[in-house]
Amino acid sequence: MIPLRDTIQSRHYPVVTIALICVNAFVYMVQMAQGPEFQQFAYTYGLVPARYTVDEIGRQFTMGEQAFAMLSFMFLHGGLLHIVGNMWILYIFGDNVEDFMGSFNFLVFYLVGGFFSGMAHMMLNLESTTPVIGASGAVAAVMGAYFILYPTARILTLIPIVFIPFFIELPAYVFLGIWFMLQVINAAGTAGMDGPGIAWWAHIGGFVFGVVGIQLVRSWAGGAARESGKRWDGIRRKKSQHLQLIKPVSGDNDLDLKGEISVTPYEANAGTTKSVNIPVGFQKRMYRIKVPGGIENGNLLRLRGLGRKGPDGRVGDLYLDVRVEEPW
């Protein structure tokens, strides 16, 4: 399952989320520049449980190196797919969690979640000499927080079946619940991680921290007030979601379909291009549409040939009702 987007529009630009993605990308380029020395690089800056539990190994590192590795391991990655996957999921879920708790608190939450994920792995692999690297545990903490904050949000999910892409909307609690159960199942079949592999318990530890930690953040930071509309100061968004889900409706005998598309006042004035996801039978298809500048609330956009097909072969159109509104 590959998440493509969620349906919750964040009210502010996710400054820390984007910054974390950039830092991870920069560190990845640094580690790739190590060439054949990457294994030693990962051993130095990755999380190696034996460095903290085996005296002979621990004495090879200074106290500062030991402490720094507790942080640096979550910015290293084992390959391109590893970092792209982690950063994409952070991008999908991080903006809303950051929007809820504020940028500084989100940064602390992310780093502490990554630390706890590393500790969860270490507790079950005390003498392992295999470096654990990757943002997966910290990202899992963000997913755990999202699971509590937005359980009914819809996640547009790509499920590749052979070579056919299948799109489906899943409630967040279903998507994240399935993801978490897969981690538990895989962890149950793994006694430990004595060699290269996936640190399943780090994922589980991060997710559990996110579920518990967000409850503490709610209590400490006045979550009820935030949910009622009081938000942290930040850079307000000017644009609505680039990818939008269209749910067309029609009359019994009408070949034309009707739906809605949302744009902000800024986009209505300047014009914009959106990707829309439209149900076609049991699948959903993606289309790119141009919203012209100067459009007003209630104007209709006509998409030819995207309506219903009649018994005589005629095909109706899809009309999108433009809703000009702030994205928060």
Image (cartoon, helix red, strand yellow):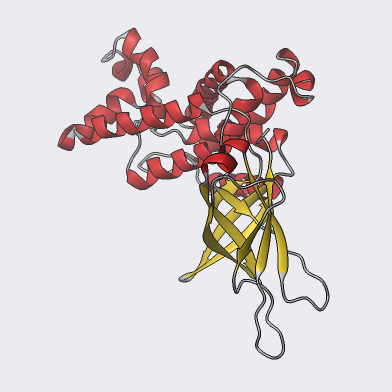
Residue at image location 58% in from the left, 45% down from the top: 294
| Position of 70 relative to 97 (above/below) | above
Q: Is residue 320 visible?
A: yes
Position of residue 63 in the picture relative to residue 179 (left or right): left
In the rendered image, the residue lying farthest to the right is 252
Q: Can residue 208 be seen?
A: no
Residue 35 lies, in percent from the top left, at 17, 37
Question: Farthest residue toward the left?
Answer: 36
Q: Which quadrant would the N terminus be assigned to in this image?
A: bottom right
Name the residue at the front extreme. Answer: 294
* Above/below status of 236 relative to 251: above
Work out whether residue 14 or residue 56 is closer to the camera in this orientation and state it. 14
In the foreground, 70 or 233: 233
Give the percent coordinates (x, y) of residue 251.
82, 71
Does residue 268 appear to the left or right of 149 in the view shown? Answer: left
Quarter of the image with the C terminus in it: top right
Q: How many marks?
A: 0
Relative height, residue 270 to residue 124 (above, below): below
Q: Residue at x 62, y 71 (%)?
A: 306
Going 66% across and 40% down the picture, which residue do you hit?
8
Classify residue 42 by image quadrant.
top left
Residue farthest to the top, as pictured: 63
Residue 75, quarter of the rendered image: top left
Residue 2 on image: x %, y %: 52, 53
Where is residue 275 shown, x and y percent of the image?
53, 54
Task: Name the one closer to the observer, 261 or 72.
Answer: 261
Q: Nearer the viewer, residue 238 or 156?
A: 238
Q: Which residue is found at the position 35% from the left and 42% from the top?
A: 196
Q: In this picture, is 178 found above or below 61? A: below
